[in-house]
Amino acid sequence: MDRQARADVAGRRRGRGLSAVTNPAMLSIPLGICHCGCGGPTTPARQTDRREGRIVGVPLLFIRGHGNKGLNKTVPPYDETKRRAEIESRLVRDGECLIWTGTLNPYGYGMVSWHGHYKLVHILTYEWANGPVPGGLELDHLCRRHDCAEPKHLEAVTHRVNMLRGQTIAARHAAKTHCIHGHEFTPENTRMRRGARECRTCSRERQRKTQPVSCAA
């Protein structure tokens, strides 16, 4: 067996080389999309490796671990319409909310597989209705239900606004109107220090206690 034949066998075994593409369905998948049929994007090769069929800068044929999924099989193209219908069938109306009845992550948000990757359900439904979430923003549930995927209940806000609206430590501190010693947080009695409010009255009292007492002559 010559060198090229050995390289072809190695590429077929690893499922990454061009020789791994053995059926017409896989040949119809564009470069940059995983050829196992999951629809996920592949990354460019970091270096050239003839034995595995890699060329630096050229997208790999498979996502890592997907190499053997599509070999010698007829892989249908990713049916986005069918997958969307499957996801929508698991959304149940509860009053004005649209509740996800499938898998939830530890924080109570719905999760689903979309184009070979896990994605939060409420982000997916928002994008279906309004397009991509603007850069630098995240979605806030106005109804305060994490398992709700109703696009009308989602608002794109900054991370700080999202934290202040929720049941977080930052939100509890922001809701305080007086310091721990009972001084009101008025504009005249408040200053910002390291991103947090500080009571000017308490600050003056601390300085008075720490300043050395001068002895009279």
Image: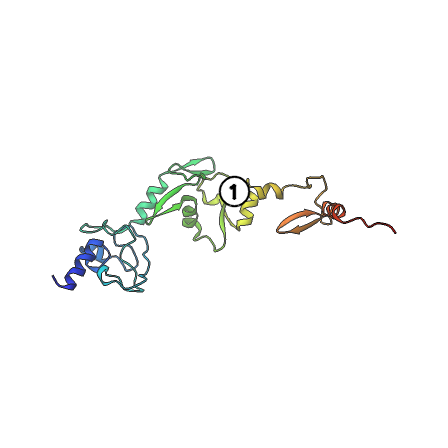
Decide: few, some or many residues near mark 1? Use Cα within 10 Å; few <14, some 14-19, many ≥20: some
Point out residue 95 in the picture as x, y percentages from the top left corner. 47, 35
User: At x 68% / y 39%, what residue is drawn?
Assistant: 180
Residue 46 as seen in the image, left or right of residue 209: left
User: At x 77% / y 49%, what residue is drawn?
Assistant: 212
The quadrant of the rendering that contains the N terminus is: bottom left
Callout 1 secondary element: loop
Residue 18 as seen in the image, left or right of residue 88: left
Q: How many marks?
A: 1
Task: Establish if 27 lies above or below 79.
Answer: below
User: At x 65% / y 48%, what residue is drawn?
Assistant: 197
Q: Residue furthest left?
A: 1
Q: Amino acid at mark 1?
A: Leu
User: At x 30% / y 59%, what residue is drawn?
Assistant: 32
Point out residue 141 in the picture as x, y percentages from the top left corner. 50, 43
Quadrant for residue 5, please give it: bottom left
Q: Nearer the viewer, residue 192 or 6?
A: 6
Point out residue 101 in the picture as x, y percentages from the top left corner. 39, 36
> What residue is pinned by disc 1?
142
